[in-house]
Image: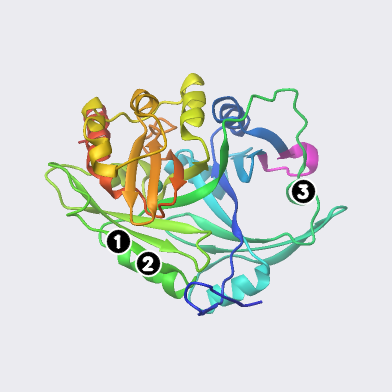
Amino acid sequence: MQQSSPETGLTDFLPLEGTDYVEFYVGNAKQAAHFYKTAFGFQSLAYAGPETGSKDKASYVVRQHSLTFVFTTPLRSQNSMADHIYKHGDGVKVLALRVPNATDAWQQTTQRGAKTYMTPRTLTDDAGEVVISGIHTYGDTVHLFIERKNYEGVFLPGYRKWESAYHPAETGLLYVDHCVGNVGWNQMNKWVKFYEEVMGFRNILSFDDTDISTEYSALMSKVMSNGNGFVKFPINEPAEGKKKSQVEEYLEFYEGEGCQHVALATHDIVKTVTDLQNRGIEFLKVPVSYYDTLLQRVGKIDEDLSPLKELGILVDRDEEGYLLQIFTKPVEDRPTLFFEIIQRKGARSFGKGNFKALFEAIEREQEERGNL
Ligand code: FE2
């Protein structure tokens, strides 16, 4: 099942069809699912719990367009899921990738050095079968490979349709653009190598501390992409600065490496961010002076400046076009996971021109928490 990449012409030993879902381990899955429905406009999709034969955990699956989130909580304390939440707080456990062949994906990656999380297994119900396998990545995070071409059910075998009378309007979120991992001091290149050698990804962009530093703190980042560009994983590590960097704050409060942010794509960022703000989602704000020189920096854009300024949406340009982006504040009490909302208009980069303004905004928040 190997495919040739149109960009490199090289054989892709791990063909990926995109992100299948993101699973969060949380303290209270029922309430988390309600928050993502209410605030982000996800819709109820599927449920697994004691009523469906899952005695030790409950999972709620929500969807918006091609974006699927799963919130899972353990029902008792003596298990690895409860340990995960005790240590990390709420956070991303699984970045699940859709593959044409999950057995092959597991073989290809483990023979290149990946550590097995789950040997290939076939799950079946009346709607067909799904093959799942999995490997470990940074921290306690894992990748599952999901092969669902022979499945017509609502989510996965073991889940039933989640019937709900509550359908908050969607906010225009479409799919996962990229997921960023924070890793420890001097660990970035180890994980870059992992994605290159074990998963066949390429390093498409790099930022060092001269790109990403403020007066106080710095970080380094490399963006890893699979062959068709459907799956992108930037990897951050802290860099030496006068004070504690945001990556260090994350590592301290997540108590280890993990997923820092998930970027969600929209085709209309002004509408999406207006909706999200109206529903109580809080975003990082840059000083309004950012907008004084914006058009000189990025040139002509299709959008009016005033709603961007009002909402705090950032703009950056590269050789291929521009992008609009904004970052939420952390969505839990620990200063760990947050979301990015991104609209791409040709640009395939990640907003390097916004890093300085953005990190100064993050530092103001760190300062308030006493963690700078
Ligand atoms: Fe991002």
Find the magenta span and give its range: 46-60
Q: Which of 49 and 4 is in front in this view?
A: 4
**Disc 2 within 8 angstroms of ligand 1 (CB):** no
Rendered view: 203 above or below 18: below
- Residue 372, given in percent of the width and then of the height, sits at 20, 36
**Toward the viewer: 3 or 43?**
3
Mark 1 and mark 3: Cα distance apart in space: 41 Å
The first of marks 1 and 3 along the sequence is 3
| 55 part of magenta stretch | yes
At label 2, counting other C-alpha atoms closer than 10 Å, the crowd grade (few under 14, some 14-19, many 20 or more) is: some
Q: Is residue 67 left or right of residue 298?
A: right
Q: Which amino acid does label 3 sit on?
A: Gly
Between 189 and 268, the one lying in front of the other is: 268
Residue 313 x/y as whole percent: 37, 33
- Kindly identify which residue carries mark 1: 206
Residue drawn 24% across and 27% down? 287
Nearest to the eye among marks 2 and 3: give it. 2
Q: What residue type is labelled 1?
A: Ser
Look at the image and name its color scheme: rainbow
Disc 3 crowd, CA 10 A, few/some/many (<14, 14-19, 20+): some
Residue placed furthest toward the right: 126
Label ID, residue 158: 3
- The residue indicated by pointer 2 is 203
Q: Contact, CB < 8 Å: mark 1 with mark 2?
A: yes
311 within the magenta span? no
Name the amino acid, label 2: Asn
